Image (spheres, rainbow, N blue to C red):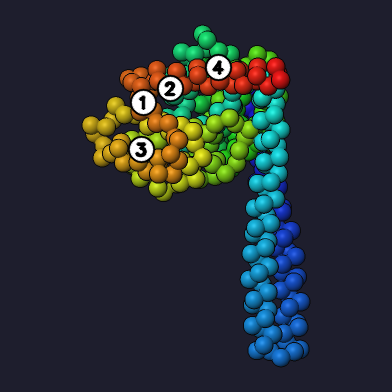
Amino acid sequence: MRVLINVFSRIKFLIATILKKHEKHEKHENHENHENHENHEKHEKHEKHEKIEGKMEISLEQNILGANDKISDELKEYFSKENILCLNLMSSPGSGKTSLLVKTLSVLSKEFSMAVVEGDLQTDNDARRIAETGVQVVQINTNGGCHLDAKMVKDSLKSLNMNGVEILFVENVGNLVCPAEFSVGEDHKITLLSVAEGDDKPQKYPTMFHSSAVMLLNKVDLLPYVDFDTIKAREHASALNKNIIVFPVSCRTEEGLEAWYDWLRAEVAKKKSAIAFENAE
């Protein structure tokens, strides 16, 4: 049930290799500076190193994201071919992703075949909660990694029976930064914001909300007890993404959940129609 995957050893090795080459280059430059016009060469060396460091940082980021995007595109093609709606659920820790999934799976399992990829730093606690709904689930433990990536999701699918699956939920690691950068082949990113967190989160973490199709304002049953302005939260999110859809919900009282379910139903129907249209051409 558990899939233990960690990309950070690969990244550390890549960084160590680049830094080692950079260190050799620095020693070589220092030797040249000592033999030639010292003041002029030191200035030139400083400029060269600034440029080299910038190139290394950009190259490393491009390599990592580029490799991820390639696998993500493969997943997207697979999901399209198999008529699977893939949704990437993201939020900060404790916003209620798993609670939302438990409610959603319990209601919609009568209508759709679904599966879940569950991401966490450690434990399979959330995967166990998902499994209690009767929906198949696979656990990915990142062992300290702050997000899931496309390769992790691709590898985890080997532990699921994807035949006939109509909706695949990917519950990402609780984090409002890194998950937004790494696509996992999803049709849509979904972000949860609990009212206990603060209505300025979209301003503080713009990439997350800019890239999301839906923002679920969760735990609205707590509004009488917290200082959270739902209008401001909507305005902040809409300023980043004018097309973002906002659903105020409570997993405890089930307020607003039916609108979320209806959106899911519509997205499944939309994907099936699009695939049928493509096949007819």
Mark 4 vs 3, N-terminal side: 3
Looking at this view, name the residue that lies furthest to the top: 110
Q: Secondary structure at mark 4?
A: helix
Quarter residue 1 falls in: top right
Query: What's the distance in space between the residues labelled 4 and 3, CA to CA?
Result: 27 Å
Mark 4 vs 2, N-terminal side: 2
- Residue at (43%, 22%) from the top-left corner? 260
Query: What's the distance in space between the residues labelled 3 and 2, CA to CA?
Result: 16 Å
Task: Tell me the kind of residue under disc 2.
Answer: Trp
Q: Are marks 4 and 2 in contact (CB under 8 Å)?
A: no
Quarter residue 15 falls in: bottom right
Query: What's the distance in space between the residues labelled 2 and 1, CA to CA?
Result: 8 Å
Mark 4 vs 1, N-terminal side: 1
Q: Secondary structure at mark 3?
A: helix
Residue under pointer 1:
249
- 245, above or below 266, in the image: below
Task: Tell me the kind of residue under disc 3.
Answer: Arg
Looking at this view, name the residue that lies furthest to the left: 224
Looking at this view, is 42 or 279 the one in front? 279
Q: Position of residue 34 (x, y in %)?
A: 73, 87
Residue under pointer 3:
234
Residue under pointer 4:
269
Query: What's the distance in space between the residues labelled 1 and 3, CA to CA?
Result: 14 Å
Looking at this view, name the residue that lies furthest to the front: 281
- Residue at (73%, 78%) from the top-left corner? 29
Mark 3 vs 2, N-terminal side: 3
Q: Are marks 2 and 1 in contact (CB under 8 Å)?
A: yes
